[in-house]
Image (spheres, rainbow, N blue to C red):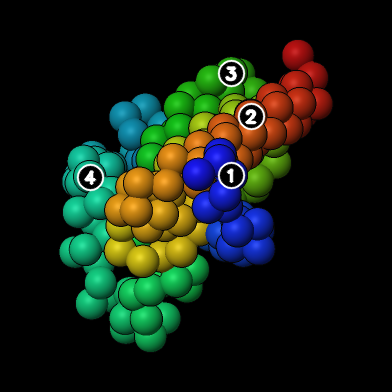
């Protein structure tokens, strides 16, 4: 049988669309959850504006626990919660909750690191003008840390591509599911190679666009 004989391009197209949906939906929610978590980790740390050892340790412990769970296990453990939230543990919808829970703590730590790079005098200058904590966060911390936040989102997006592939193990759809069902279970090497090539291209595009955005926002 010639190379490519097993490839059904309509299935490849559908799997690619499913992967992009999973990636887009989970990345948007990850950023929405990860930024507030990262800000809280930063603000409650020693010497910061809302220093609280208890709050910092509590949030940090939860973040670290979620980060330490292998994603494949998280997929299985979260099935009851996923069913409660979206009504199914299969397909694109069923993959997004565990993707977000797996990626948001990771991004939160990257956000915390980006905020630590903001020069202390910048924060003190805004604080001296009488700004509230919320104003300091919105008008000083986040704008100054924007290149780091974009770089962190890029790293997280690349990780999510890998997570979407693993989600194929539990029938989430996408390129990972296609690679497992045809490439692995049916030994169709051509399908496996095409799906891997598409995921490599996707990662390269994400990294390229993320790097360009980070440079565009960096005015130093």
Q: Determine which residue is flagged by label 3.
A: 119
Mark 3 → mark 1, Cα distance in angstroms: 55 Å
Mark 1 vs mark 4: which is more N-terminal?
A: 1
In what quadrant of the picture does the C terminus appear? top right
The reply to whether residue 160 is visible in this rendering is no
* Residue 35 horizontal/vertical position (percent): 51, 47
Residue located 63% across and 29% down the image: 204
Mark 4 → mark 3, Cα distance in angstroms: 35 Å
Q: Which residue in the rendered view is the most extreme toward the front?
A: 1
Q: Determine which residue is flagged by label 4.
A: 70
Assess whether mark 4 and mark 1 are in contact (beta carbons under 8 angstroms): no
Circle 2 SS class? helix
Mark 3 vs mark 1: which is more N-terminal?
A: 1
Mark 2 vs mark 3: which is more N-terminal?
A: 3
Assess whether mark 1 and mark 3 are in contact (beta carbons under 8 angstroms): no
Q: Determine which residue is flagged by label 2.
A: 204
Residue located 70% across and 27% down the image: 208
Mark 4 → mark 2, Cα distance in angstroms: 24 Å
């Amino acid at each position: 049988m010639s190379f490519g004989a097993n490839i059904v391009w309509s299935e490849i197209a559908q799997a690619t669309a499913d992967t992009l949906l999973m990636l887009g939906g989970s990345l948007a929610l990850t950023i929405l959850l990860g930024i507030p978590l990262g800000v809280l980790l930063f603000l409650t740390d020693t010497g910061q504006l809302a220093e609280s050892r208890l709050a910092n340790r509590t949030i940090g412990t939860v973040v670290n626990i979620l980060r330490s769970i292998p994603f494949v296990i998280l997929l299985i453990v979260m099935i009851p919660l996923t069913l409660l939230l979206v009504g199914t543990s299969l397909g694109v919808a069923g993959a997004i909750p565990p993707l977000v829970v797996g990626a948001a703590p990771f991004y939160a730590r990257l956000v915390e690191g980006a905020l630590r790079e903001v020069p202390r005098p910048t924060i003190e200058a805004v604080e001296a003008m009488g700004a509230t904590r919320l104003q300091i966060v919105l008008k000083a911390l986040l704008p100054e840390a924007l290149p780091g936040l974009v770089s962190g989102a890029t790293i997280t997006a690349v990780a999510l591509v890998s997570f979407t592939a693993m989600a194929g193990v539990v029938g989430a759809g996408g390129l990972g599911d296609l690679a497992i069902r045809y490439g692995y279970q049916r030994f169709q090497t051509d399908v496996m190679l095409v799906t891997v090539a598409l995921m490599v291209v996707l990662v390269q595009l994400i990294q390229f666009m993320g790097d360009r955005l980070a440079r565009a926002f960096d005015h130093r």
